[in-house]
Image: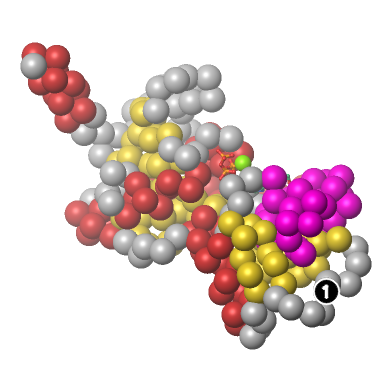
Amino acid sequence: MVEMRLQAGRVRGLDRGSTLAIAVSKGRILSEFRTLLDRMEIKCAEDPETSRSLVIPLKDRGLRLVIVRAADVPTYVEYGAADLGVAGKDVLLEYRGEGFYEPLDLDIARCKLVVAGKAEPLPRAGRLRVATKYVQTTRRHFAQKGDQVEVIHLYGSMELAPLVGLADCIVDLMDTGNTLKANGLVVLETIAEISARLIINKAAMKMKNTAVKALIAELAKALDQTATDRNLAL
Ligand code: PRT
Ligand code: MG
């Protein structure tokens, strides 16, 4: 009982003194987002890549990172468990809720969402079978073209599906293209250019407007600086 009260106090205590929580996933999104934070001279109180802690305060800013799975970022933000989030456009296209704004393309974790298959013509007879973890986006894409397809939901290793006859083609992310190439697959069509976006809980935008607007402005400035530096380097 005492322990439960202590724990509840500790959870509530997270809110004291800090104003904004940002949901972000470990891996490529966090590492590139940290480059942006560095530009803004914002430092993590502990290293999120090595720490087991899922809540990482940012020094002197009243901000904290909440570490979640990439596909869970919109859920945390929609329900207000985080005020802001950094999520791939692929994840946002697939998400069915709408409880957030998407004000900023952070231009990080860039890749393409593509249809890929073997370097041979697709079968003409019958419905095309498409394996993907992006079920909604895939359905929408083929429906818009007026193509009837059977979507097979996989959780990973999409590239395997055409090789073992599970599907005729796949819809997956591609960055360098090395994974497709290594499995003898080629891009048949690009569905969307993908990058990570800043999303904001609608209520937080109202209730914490000053802090949220200030953070967006700072991030936008850091993005401008990055673009300027990139152009100078060319
Ligand atoms: O890995 P986990 O199961 O925890 O979750 P996740 O796969 O959703 O997260 P993570 O960290 O792998 O990806 C987070 C986000 O990064 C995605 O939602 C995208 O918005 C973005 N991103 C950018 C990518 C890639 N580039 C990418 N290349 N996500 C995944 N990949 C995969 C791609 O599907 C391929 O299988 O990486 C593989 C290698 O790609 P190539 O073309 O460079 O060989
Ligand atoms: Mg992954």
Q: Is residue 234 covered in magenta?
A: no
Camera sees residue 162: no
Quarter holding residue 98: bottom left
Residue type at mark 1 is: Pro
Residue 75, image x, y percentages: 37, 51
Which range is magenta? 157-186
The residue shown at (79%, 57%) is 165
- In the image, residue 100 above or below residue 26: below
Residue 121, image x, y percentages: 88, 72
The residue shown at (85%, 56%) is 185
State whether label 1 is within 8 Å of ligand 1: no
Residue 177, image x, y percentages: 81, 51
Residue named by callout 1: 123
Secondary structure type for disc 1: loop
The crowding category of the residue bearing disc 1, from other C-alpha atoms within 10 Å (few below 14, some 14 to 19, many at least 20), is few
Residue 172 located left or right of residue 207: right
Near-viewer residue (16 or 118)? 118
The residue shown at (27%, 49%) is 80
The residue shown at (80%, 68%) is 188
Residue 139, image x, y percentages: 57, 71
